[in-house]
Image (cartoon, rainbow, N blue to C red):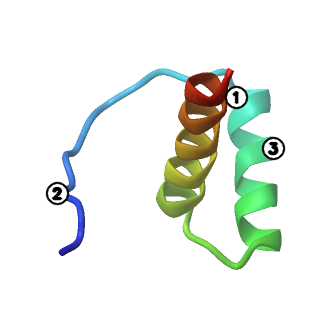
């Protein structure tokens, strides 16, 4: 079963947003999918510490 999705609104620095868009495109993912992936990896790394 897929995780439930929730819509949120955040403010992000434009330079960071541009970098995220570039990396998402390189990874052939939507921006939303890429941000989810990055956040999941970050949370997992914090739990593994």
Is residue 3 positioned above or below 12 on the image? below
Is residue 6 positioned above or below 3 on the image? above
Please provide percent x and percent y for residue 4.
16, 57
According to the picture, the residue beneath numbered tag 3 turns out to be: 19
Q: Is residue 7 left or right of residue 12?
A: left
Disc 2 is placed on an element classified as loop
Q: Are marks 2 and 1 in contact (CB under 8 Å)?
A: no
Looking at marks 2 and 1 on the same chain, the residue that comes earlier in the sequence is marked by 2
Q: Are marks 2 and 3 in contact (CB under 8 Å)?
A: no
Q: Is residue 46 left or right of residue 26?
A: left
According to the picture, the residue beneath numbered tag 2 turns out to be: 4
Residue furthest to the front in view is 48
Please provide percent x and percent y for residue 30.
55, 68
Identify which residue is drawn at 23% across, 60% down: 3
Disc 1 is placed on an element classified as helix
Identify which residue is drawn at 54% across, 31% down: 43
Is residue 13 positioned above or below 30 on the image? above
Instruction: Name the mark nearer the viewer: 2 or 1.
Output: 2
Q: Residues within 10 Å of mark 1 (few under 14, many from 20)?
A: few
Looking at marks 3 and 1 on the same chain, the residue that comes earlier in the sequence is marked by 1
Q: Is residue 23 left or right of residue 43?
A: right
Looking at marks 2 and 3 on the same chain, the residue that comes earlier in the sequence is marked by 2
Q: Residues within 10 Å of mark 2 (few under 14, many from 20)?
A: few
Q: CA distance from mark 2 to mark 1?
A: 28 Å
Quadrant of the rendering where the C terminus is positioned = top right
Please provide percent x and percent y for residue 46.
61, 23
According to the picture, the residue beneath numbered tag 1 turns out to be: 14
């Amino acid at each position: 079963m897929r995780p439930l999705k929730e819509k949120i609104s955040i403010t992000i620095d434009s330079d960071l947003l541009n970098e995220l868009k570039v990396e998402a495109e390189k990874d052939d993912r939507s921006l939303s999918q890429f941000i989810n992936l990055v956040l999941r990896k970050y949370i997992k790394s914090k739990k593994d510490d």
